[in-house]
Image (cartoon, helix red, strand yellow):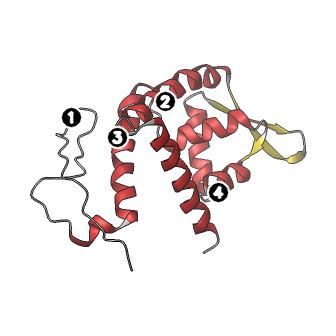
Amino acid sequence: MSARRTSPPEVYLPPSEDIPFNPRVPGIDYGVLDRLLGYAVRRAQIVQYELFIAGLARWNITPPRFSAMVIISRNPDLKLTELADVLGIARSGAVALINSLEGMGYVRRVPCPTDKRALGLQLTDQGRADLQAITEAVDESDRRGAQALTEAEQAQLLALLAKIAGSGASA
């Protein structure tokens, strides 16, 4: 016997300056979309993305730029190909990403001590300083986006999303 699925409650969030996207418009029949996990995740991601962009506009930081800065800060002399693998992007995409961060004064290429043919990536002093403030802004936008959930629900959601992401790797 299968569990009965119910539609999500009609919650209207009026568009705001920070979140112009409304994931549930009253009076709209979403049909099969209401029971699709991927659709729900994507709608939530749009809200989180818009909060992120609004909170980080002053630095011109996008989610890929932030992710790259965090990974580089935590992994000294990481190579460009390794960054591409970690972020799940093509090497050409990683080159463009690093070129933009380098142009912003946040990242520099340095000789890699373990591979003389390769260059490693490091944050500049400015990159390290701004990353701290950027991370605080990201934490705040994340808190705002998850304010409808308790801490336990947030932890559960993170665990469930990690489980889904892990199952996709073996498919």
Q: Are marks 2 and 3 in contact (CB under 8 Å)?
A: no
- Describe the element under mark 4 as helix, strand or loop: helix
Q: Nearer the viewer, mark 4 or mark 1?
A: 1
Q: Point out the tag, 4 or 1, that comes first from the N-terminus.
A: 1
- Describe the element under mark 2 as helix, strand or loop: helix
Q: Residue at x 22, y 47 (%)?
A: 22
Q: Residue at x 57, y 48 (%)?
A: 96
In this view of the protein, which residue sits in the foreground, 3 or 49? 3
- Describe the element under mark 3 as helix, strand or loop: helix
Q: Is residue 77 left or right of residue 1?
A: right
Q: Quadrant of residue 48?
A: top left
Q: Quadrant of residue 32?
A: bottom left
Q: Point out the tag, 4 or 2, that comes first from the N-terminus.
A: 4
Q: According to the image, label 2 marks what residue?
A: 139
Q: Point out the tag, 4 or 3, that comes first from the N-terminus.
A: 3
Q: Residues within 10 Å of mark 1 (few under 14, many from 20)?
A: few
Q: Point out the tag, 1 or 2, that comes first from the N-terminus.
A: 1
Q: According to the image, label 1 marks what residue?
A: 16
Q: Residue at x 61, y 19 (%)?
A: 129
- Describe the element under mark 1 as helix, strand or loop: loop
Q: Nearer the viewer, mark 4 or mark 3?
A: 3
Image label count: 4
Q: Quadrant of the N terminus?
A: bottom left
Q: Given the image, on which type of amino acid does mark 1 rest?
A: Ser
Q: According to the image, label 4 marks what residue?
A: 91
Compute the Cα span from label 1 to label 2: 20 Å
Compute the Cα span from label 4 to label 3: 27 Å
